[in-house]
Amino acid sequence: MERVRIGVVIAVALTTIVSVVAGQQAGRGQQTPNPVQQKYPYPVVRDLRGVVPPGPKPLPSPPLGAGPWTFQTTEAKMRVSVVTKGFSHPFTGALKRA
């Protein structure tokens, strides 16, 4: 009878120790890695996907014609002509220094 009681006490003690150690290890995964989150209850980085609607889809642009084109504005009549075509990187010439 005495041996059974000692066996039960040892089993309960081991179960308690194992559950406490497992709880501590599980609690480590739930800790916040960012110390700012301990001060503020809300998330520091907000995920705005689904909150902010996406912007408008761009319309397809027609191919550039031969030109020249004339546009009438409220102040003047503007004439636009093509200077060159066929550049693979058209803005490289715009950034060169004179």
Image: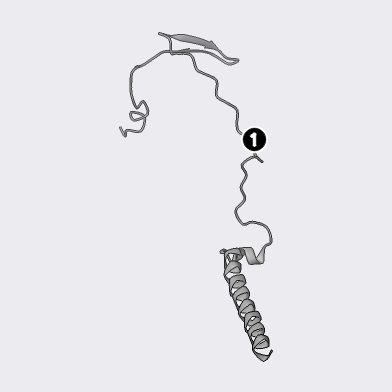
Q: Quadrant of residue 97?
A: top left
Question: Residue 9: horizontal and vertical position, in percent?
Answer: 66, 85
Residue 54, above or below 61: below
Q: In the shown orientation, is residue 32 left or right of residue 93?
A: right
Which residue, as the protein is rendered here, is positioned at the far left? Answer: 98
Residue drawn 66% across and 82% down?
8
Q: Quadrant of residue 23?
A: bottom right
The one of 19 and 81 positioned closer to us in this rendering: 19
Please identify the quadrant where the C terminus is shown.
Answer: top left
Q: How many marks?
A: 1
Would you name the residue on which mark 1 appears?
53
Please identify the quadrant where the N terminus is shown.
Answer: bottom right
Residue 22, above or below 67: below
**Amino acid type for the residue under numbered disc 1:** Pro
Which residue, as the protein is rendered here, is positioned at the far front? Answer: 1
Question: Residue 29: horizontal and vertical position, in percent?
Answer: 57, 64
Residue drawn 58% across and 16% down?
75
| Mark 1: few/some/many CA within 10 Å (<14, 14-19, 20+) | few
The one of 51 and 70 positioned closer to us in this rendering: 51
Q: In the shown orientation, is residue 90 left or right of residue 57?
A: left
Question: Residue 14: horizontal and vertical position, in percent?
Answer: 61, 80
The one of 19 and 46 positioned closer to us in this rendering: 19
- Label 1: state its secondary structure: loop
The one of 59 and 14 positioned closer to us in this rendering: 14
Question: Residue 96: horizontal and vertical position, in percent?
Answer: 32, 33
